[in-house]
Amino acid sequence: MKFFLILFLIVGLCACNRTSGLFKNSKQTVVCEKIDIDFLIALNIELILQDSILLLNDFKLDPMITVLNLNNNSTVSTFLQKGEGPNDCIPPVQLQRLDDSIYILERQTAVLNKFQYSMINDGNVNLEKIWQSNNFPNTFVPLNDTVFMATMINSKSRFVLIDKKGEDVGNFGEYPCLSPGENGYDNISKSMFHQTFLLKKRMENKIAAMASHVLELYSYDEKYNFNLERQILFSKYEYSPSTSSDMNSITSSENTDRGAMCFYNTDKYIYVVYNPENERLYMHPEKRKNELWIFDWDGNPIKALLPDKDITTIAVDEKDNYIYGVDKNCELFRINIKI
């Protein structure tokens, strides 16, 4: 069977409700300060920040990764060319950092590579293949250097654990069922709608599973037994599945917002880029700008930031002082935040 899959980090997701629910008394207007850089951003799908170094993962550029020094806003290096060579990748890719390594998931081939973070200084990045999965993970996060948690479109379970050989060592988790009729949908339909991004709290066995409408917080023990600790509904949603020509698809209701579309975390907080428009108004010139929602790791809503630019992707410094974001016009900004 063929599955219809909207790429998670490129076009975002779907959702409903407004800040009036979760953040009705905690909204703050913020100003985006433009950062002048010495290169053009084409289609940024991911940012990773470490100290003063910002990595921009760009779907259209070749090489795909640009390394920016925020102290002087200059390009340090570029790497990861498009292709099938030993140090190339086929886009889209997802990056995750663990200690001194950066892992790269090449979705189209289900290959996970890694390289040493220090290699970005001169762009001489040599990829080390970790595994190639028989499944096709959509997103992933390393729990450590031997076990990886992933999501994918499948009928079995929501999450899969993959070892360093690329073999499945655990399947678990259920999809949210918070919409009328959703209990009757199959897992394929649910997995297509609740496409999930994973964040790990550093130094603790805690995972945030982020979908367009729902934030779920998990803890796990040394044997990788996972426990759902809290479920937070961002907004009401409704969708319906359909099958045509052996292809599965889903359709959101007109009143369902696009919702959460980018995520980032620090040791203290979880950050969400939330799109408050429904599908019908998404491309409208008068659409409301995306909002930046902040939760703590217990799932408590802390603050909603209302930027003066339509921010689409973000990264946050470890002290939670600044958000760096790319807007829909492919410009880079810095936002000073006070939590």
Image (spheres, rainbow, N blue to C red):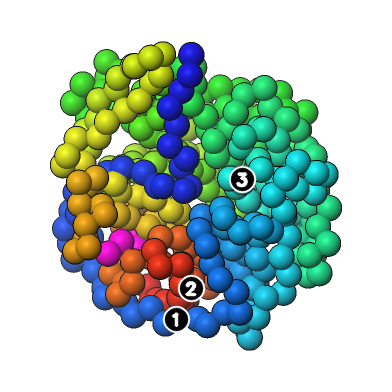
Camera-side mark, 1 or 3: 3
Q: Position of residue 213 (x, y in %)?
A: 31, 42
Residue 202 image label: none
Q: Label 2 to label 3, Cα distance in Å?
A: 22 Å
At mark 2, the secondary structure is strand
Q: Is residue 67 left or right of residue 296?
A: right
Residue at 47 percent of width and 40 percent of height: 7
* Foreground residue among 308 and 61: 61
In the rendered structure, which amino acid carries the disc numbered 1? Answer: Lys
Return the residue at label 3.
Answer: 91
> For the magenta stretch, what is the residue range?
289-293
Q: Mark 1 or mark 2: name the one nearer the start of the chain.
A: 1
Residue at 60 percent of width and 28 percent of height: 136
Return the residue at label 1.
Answer: 34
Q: Position of residue 25 (x, y in %)?
A: 18, 66
At mark 1, the secondary structure is strand
Marks 1,2: beta carbons within 8 A? yes
Return the residue at label 2.
Answer: 332
